[in-house]
Amino acid sequence: MPVTNLMDRFFGLDMLYRIPALLIALTMHELAHGLMAYRLGDNTAKQQGRLTLNPLKHLDPIGLLALWIVGFGWAKPVPVNPYNFKGNRRFGLFLVGLAGPLTNFVLAILSALLLVTVPWRTTYLLAITQLTFIYNVMLGVFNLLPLPPLDGSKVLQLFLPQRLAYHYLRFEQYGTLLLVLLIFTRLLERILYPLADFVISLLTTIVLFIIGIM
């Protein structure tokens, strides 16, 4: 089923169902960034109390409200200082950037497995799990877009010449404005939804494979 149909179907559910799904997706995304940075030698996130499952430490109230109501939003970015990384800083930044979206995709797979293997008897839990799948797919795909300050820019910079990567990441101060423009002109939807459909197909294949070997 195309992601547009899924969003129309599941976002029509009671808005209270969205809260747990959002908290799971956003909290685990930011925690993954912080944990990866910590493993690479940067304890900035730990010093600021961000290596926690407490969603209150990761949420931006306005960003959460926007995501809850209109489907696009943001969390409080985990502070990362690549100068503290052990080894190659650019590769470290790549790993930190990739950690958040990959965590969302893993959560989406786990949600899908629950949806097809658990005999659901509670509508509330079923709705939360469905929304958890959708939010994690959308958050993972959205953050992998190669637009600073999104995670995709941290991934792409590894494959650019060093000088170009430096100037590319400095575009972050303008990237937010461009992102807002893409959202309000609805151009972002035309980019995001086809990518999300592809990821859903890929994750579905993975889930079917896992079920097949269980």
Image (spheres, rainbow, N blue to C red):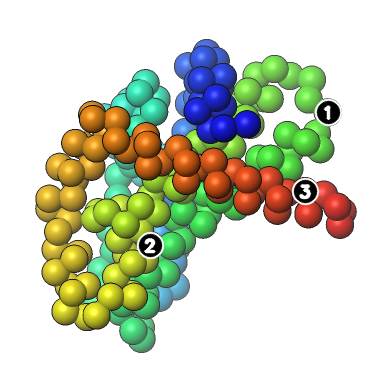
Residue in the image at 86% along x and 57% along y: 213
Say which amino acid is labelled 3.
Leu
Query: Toward the viewer: 186 or 151?
Result: 186
The relative height of residue 25 versus residue 89 in the rendered view (above or below) is above
Say which amino acid is labelled 2.
Gly
Note whether residue 183 is visible: yes
Residue in the image at 25% along x and 69% along y: 81
Residue 97 disc label: 2
**Residue receiving disc 3:** 208
- The answer to which of marks 3 and 2 sits earlier in the sequence is 2
On the image, the x and y values in percent for residue 33 come to 40, 59
- The answer to which of marks 1 and 2 sits earlier in the sequence is 2
Query: Does 61 sit left or right of 171 as displayed?
Result: right
**Residue receiving disc 1:** 119
Give the mark toward the camera: 3 or 2. Answer: 3
Query: Does 181 sit left or right of 140 as displayed?
Result: left
C-beta proximity under 8 Å, tags 3 and 1 = no
Residue in the image at 73% along x and 34% along y: 115
The relative height of residue 33 versus residue 193 in the rendered view (above or below) is below
Residue 175 disc label: none
Q: CA distance from mark 3 to mark 1?
A: 17 Å
